[in-house]
Amino acid sequence: MPEETAFPNPWALDPRIRRTGDTYYFAGELLVAAQDVPRLTGLLGPLRTIGRASGDPLAAFVTRVAVPDGDDGVETDLPSLVSSMRSLSAGPRIGLNHAFAANTAAPMLAGGIPIEGQPKLHGGTATDPLPVADEPDAAPVTGARTVRVAVIDTGIDPVALTTALFDRPLKHGVHEPDPVYQDPATHVIGLMGGHGTAAAGVVARYARNCELTSIQVLSVNGITDELGLAAGILRAHDAGAEIISMSLGGTFEGEAPPLALELVLDSLPKQTVVVAAAGNVDRPAPKFYPASRPGVISVAAIDTTGPAPVPAGFSNTGDWITVCAPGVRAHMPYVSGTWPFGTVPLEFHGAVAWSGTSFATPFVAARIAATTMPGQTCREAADLLLQGLPNPFPGYGRFLDAPAGFVHP
């Protein structure tokens, strides 16, 4: 298991999660391409299928199977098993059930020392979410057509949906609720409670022409498994999403990308625009997924709080990054309650200033939506937008700046 830290390590909050290198996965189960289950059974013998709801659309793509411990009671080494199956000339398409996490930046210990041991969720050097008094105002959009945008995250706080920022036409579909609280009775906010509300708020603020859908895949601790994320992408597609924004990700072992996600993303219409956070561990490798997938618009973060824009100290970098945008002290709607994880508890009242590639990502998604004109696809709008941007920060993609109000003073 990942080591514990003074700050709650989200990976340690689920006893099923294991680690190999920089990759996190769920113990005791594998994902197999649905058509390849007989082939795997022929190699390993009968395996128990871990069921999902009847009529689950993922059944057409992958099957989740249980892998028991060995006869000696030792937990099966799933990365090695997957590697051995993939080495066969006609081996089954198989993979780990990867763990993925939200991409907010790292809290700091006293003295400004970044917390270590959390390379996917809290790696980097930035700040806790900061309470702010004023809620953000919406930015006008002119000329653009209606665009359907789905934010896949922790969902959205039902209370936030009652505010002016999320008013119609933004509320077009089912908004899956953000769990928000680890203790609803006392309004104690969970580790990543409100993360999806903040991300959706960026879209609501800068793409007033959008019809918004919120998909909940991340737990209140900011974790999901690959199968849950793949199912969320299918729900976004079913909602008619033309743009999908994901402020989450992780890494994978070996050369083959996550099986279920590859199959599901391959199934999306070619014109669907997928925007994903590049991650917050200040390095080019291993590449963060799904941001690093070809065709996905990967978003790094820029710090615009100083005299001149510079790459954010926590942001991943590399030749696989598509675009960068402001991601330090982003001003967003949030939830209300007590966030207890910093050096002192923080009280929130519906607004936040927060840092991470998590919040640069929905801004890019919003700008694509806001520049999609009648008769134009979102893919065409994205290509035009990106082609016209400067490239001042090598290794961070093209720079999409935000209005001054995006960053809280």
Image (cartoon, rainbow, N blue to C red):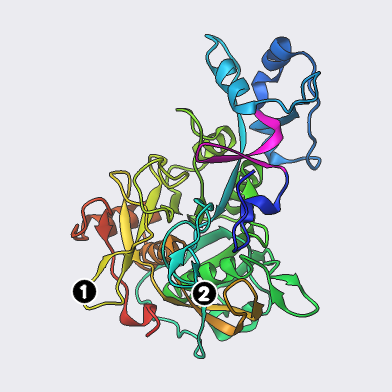
The answer to whether mark 2 and mark 1 are in CB contact below 8 A is no
Q: CA distance from mark 2 to mark 1?
A: 23 Å
Residue at x 37%, y 85% (from the top left corner): 409
Question: Where is 165 relative to 125, above or below?
Answer: below
Relative image position of residue 235 (x, y in whole percent): 63, 51
Q: Residues within 10 Å of mark 2 (few under 14, many from 20)?
A: many
Q: Per the image, is 277 magenta?
A: no
Depth check: 404 or 301 in front? 301
Number of the label disc, if any, that sits on residue 308: 1
Q: Quadrant of residue 326?
A: bottom left
Q: Is residue 377 visible?
A: no
Depth check: 352 or 69 in front? 69
Residue at x 77%, y 75% (from the top left corner): 184
Question: Where is 339 relative to 264, above or below?
Answer: below
Q: Residues within 10 Å of mark 1 (few under 14, many from 20)?
A: few
The kind of secondary structure element at disc 1 is loop
Magenta region's main secondary structure? strand
Residue at x 32%, y 73% (from the top left corner): 402
The span picked out in magenta is: 16-31
Q: Amino acid at mark 1?
A: Ala
Q: Is residue 291 visible?
A: yes
Depth check: 1 or 290 in front? 1
In what quadrant of the picture does the N terminus appear? top right
State the residue position of label 2: 129
